[in-house]
Amino acid sequence: MEYIRHELKNGIRLVHAPLASEVAYCGLLFNTGSRDESDEEEGLAHFIEHVVFKGTQRRKAWHILSRLEDVGGELNAYTTKEETFLYASFLKEDHERAVELLADIAFHSVFPEFEIEREKEVVLDEINSYLDSPGELVYDEFENMIFPGQPLGRFILGRPEKVKEITREKVVRFYENNYFTDEVVFCSAGDLPSKKVIRLFEKYFADIPTRTRRTPRRSSSGYVRKEERIRKDTYQSHCILGTAGYPVTDPRRPALYLLNNILGGQGMNSRLNLTLREKRGLAYTVESSYNPYMDTGVFSIYFGTDRKDLEKSIDLTLREMKKLREKPLGPLQLSRAKKQLTGQLTRSLENPENLLAGMGRNLLLFNRTFTLREMTAAIEKITTEDLLSIAREILDPATLSTLIYY
């Protein structure tokens, strides 16, 4: 796939991927997330993701929602600890309508006072729904535990008491201090002429005033090992074991992805799924995950199990980790693991949202795009020795933290 790239004088960058489909996609990926908040700004990155849809200099909230939905399109957004993504899907003939709308809500929102007050109630309901889901909540509490007192460890949604304190003044100040033209990428995919894509990009984004980051993003102060058990009176016990992982720019990142996939990745034939679920029926959900950040990362293992099976499940999990630390993979095992991860990666890029976000993220972090061939080549280079070395470091029980809801 040949990507098309273009950059404006104000620093906003474009990346477009040709896609043979009647449906097209585009989005704006900002290098801004909840880790950019101060203590008094907690929850603002996620809140701004909500209120950019609530009115611009030329549109009311209803007109924003209807602009694409009237022609069968869809507008959406999400916030992570390091990113904010506004994106749309639509019929390819409505490409200009989508590009203009994204530019309008991202750079011309007025954040109406009455809409902010109304949206606070919506976000509070979202938080309450999240607090009622221990299998999701435990992930955020785990990162809060291992990155104590750090923005990286906070809940993306914010705490209810902080959301209630949000004002229009705080929203405007956070937006002006954290959304920069040199740290946003316009991502596009579809069966569209490259000249048209560039022309519309220039038409709607070239006149946006230049705003660049003046101070570097605050770094994490580091991982803190800790063990904690919290009484939740849930039917299941929810357990996370984990430690710090490699940052997104670390060359060992592909090998850790592969190791993670072998241990507890999305395949039903992962070692943890076979050991805890298929062979013994101890857990419905068991998985491991690796989330790389700018300056650190998090590797974690999660499972939910009956209280009486908790200690047994932990012991079995530690045994599987020990096997990966002590026994090298054979050539056939390594080949199968690489093939599985390559297939999963290829399928994930068939999801347009993943494709857009991946292209934008690569431009933000590396100022380049990576082809599927380059990504699969990186997987092929991984050796048994690489995996063994990483397993001995990341899966070392002496570095593991534990959080249990029971």
Image (cartoon, helix red, strand yellow):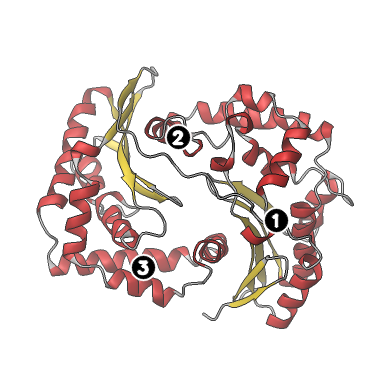
In the image, residue 214 lies at what x, y percent?
A: 64, 52
Secondary structure of residue under mark 1: strand
Quick check: can you spot residue 193?
no
Label 2 or label 1, whichever comes before in sequence order: 1
Q: Which mark is residue 140?
A: 2
Indicate which label's residue lies in the foreground, 2 or 3. 2
Single out the residue that lies furthest toward the left.
327
Could you tell me how far apart the alpha carbons at marks 1 and 3 are, in whole angstroms? Answer: 28 Å
Indicate which label's residue lies in the foreground, 2 or 1. 2
Secondary structure of residue under mark 3: helix
Q: Nearer the viewer, residue 11 or 394?
A: 11
Q: Which mark is residue 74?
A: 1
Secondary structure of residue under mark 2: helix
Please state, as top left, top right, bottom left or bottom right, where the C terminus lies in the image.
top left
Q: Is residue 244 above or below residue 29?
A: above
In the image, residue 51 lies at what x, y percent?
A: 74, 41
Q: Do callouts 2 and 3 mark residues in contact (Cβ within 8 Å)?
A: no
Q: Amino acid at mark 3?
A: Gly
Q: Amino acid at mark 2?
A: Asp
Q: Specify few, some or many for label 3: CA neighbours under 10 Å numbering under 14, 14-19, or 20 or more.
A: few
Report which residue position mark 3 lands on.
343
Left or right of 28 in this view: 234: left
Q: Specify few, some or many for label 1: CA neighbours under 10 Å numbering under 14, 14-19, or 20 or more.
A: some
Label 2 or label 3, whichever comes before in sequence order: 2
Q: Give the image quarter of residue 402.
A: top left
Q: Nearer the viewer, residue 177 or 375?
A: 177
Q: Specify few, some or many for label 2: CA neighbours under 10 Å numbering under 14, 14-19, or 20 or more.
A: some
Q: Do callouts 1 and 3 mark residues in contact (Cβ within 8 Å)?
A: no
Q: Amino acid at mark 1?
A: Glu
Quick check: can you spot residue 83?
yes
In the image, residue 323 lies at what x, y percent?
A: 13, 49
Q: Is residue 84 above or below residue 98?
A: above
